[in-house]
Image (cartoon, coloured by chain):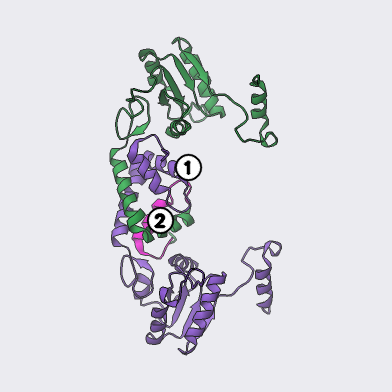
Chain colours: A green, B purple
Amino acid sequence: MRRVSSGGPEIERLIQLLAKLPGLGPRSARRAALHLIKNRDAVMTPLAQALKTAAEQVRVCTACGNLDTHDPCAICTDASRDTKTLCVVEEVADLWALERSAMFNGRYHVLGGTLSALDGIGPDDLNIPKLLARVREAGVAEVVLATNATVDGQTTAHYLAGALAAAGVTVTRLAHGVPVGGELDYLDDGTLAAAFRGRKAL
Amino acid sequence: MRRVSSGGPEIERLIQLLAKLPGLGPRSARRAALHLIKNRDAVMTPLAQALKTAAEQVRVCTACGNLDTHDPCAICTDASRDTKTLCVVEEVADLWALERSAMFNGRYHVLGGTLSALDGIGPDDLNIPKLLARVREAGVAEVVLATNATVDGQTTAHYLAGALAAAGVTVTRLAHGVPVGGELDYLDDGTLAAAFRGRKAL
């Protein structure tokens, strides 16, 4: 294999591991490694420690699928949150994005992906049976389906709406429309059509 | 401070440290953190270990300024390399880039930056006194100035050419010209002029 640095096997290995991170290629991994070595005390040693701590302590919340050092996670155990509303997301990253928006004060349910006929992913491969059980047991009044606006995301939302119909809960989904700051001329036709269909009285 | 994740302070801290790497912003640091947690055994734990090892063992070569776990570094102690030629570069990254090109079989000297009147960086702030001593003592016949083709890089090369004039060594610099694969129409005028001036008989 071609060498990626000239700093010995330890630096070599560090670069190869950094290059596995999404968003970093071989070149940026080299830059990152040099940056780390130059900032040994400020970044490198703390990062090594933070990785070790997280690897040892972070686990999946058995209730909702979020990641936290506690199980159940801080969101599930937060007594100030509304237990009647459940927001269903595909991935932990989506949960974090919604939390940053600070629009939602209920609890979450992370599916761990979407249904996909192509990849052979059915309801039992996702966190769906647990979702149905949770809705039945926990006195949930509304389930917000916040899957992505992709084909697989929408298929999954559609499937869930059907599966939840018998449970007697309100099922809602996120609105489609023009993104805030978006220019109509640059929007795809599907979004524009959805925004038009969903127009509201001023 | 605004929270960057909803996974507790350990994940939070990991994301903030990852975001300090060049090439990663807050958003890609979050993606990287999730990727790491999902690939705990394959990437996260090995990366923590590699960072720890490198932080503990990597040092600056006192002869040339390269980074290695040994001092002097593997290049300086490699008996198969030509000791008569010395290639002067700004940073360790430049040394690695030249090593990857496999064009050079001499030794290196890393300056650690460039002269800069604006930032108040003079010859004594760089690895220049050691370069001059090395050229005098080590029987060097040729010094290749491989600083960047920037204003500061060229200023530094010019200064070094002057300082080395008295040492009785041949001083050369890298050729300027059209990059391999480059299209003339997209080149800046300076490069084009340099390529024209440096034209060679076919």
**Numbered range of the magenta stretch:** A4-24
Question: Which residue is at 57% across, 28% downward?
Answer: A151
Question: Which residue is at 47% across, 49% downward?
Answer: B24
Marking on residue B27: 1
Task: Categorize mark 2 by other alpha carbons within 10 Å: few (<14), some (14-19), many (20+).
Answer: many
Q: Quadrant of the C terminus of chain A?
A: top right
Q: What's the amino acid at mark 2?
A: Ile
Quick check: B175 left or right of B133? right
Residue, disc 2: A15
Q: Which quadrant of the view contains residue B182?
A: bottom right
Chain for disc number 2: A
Q: Are marks 2 and 1 in contact (CB under 8 Å)?
A: no
Residue B149 visible in rendering: no
Q: Which quadrant of the view contains residue A139?
A: top left
Instruction: State the residue in front, B18 or B119.
Output: B119
Chain for disc number 1: B
Instruction: Measure how far apart labels 2 and 1 are at the Cα level.
Output: 21 Å
Q: Is residue A48 above or below residue B70?
A: above
- Whether A18 is among the magenta residues is yes
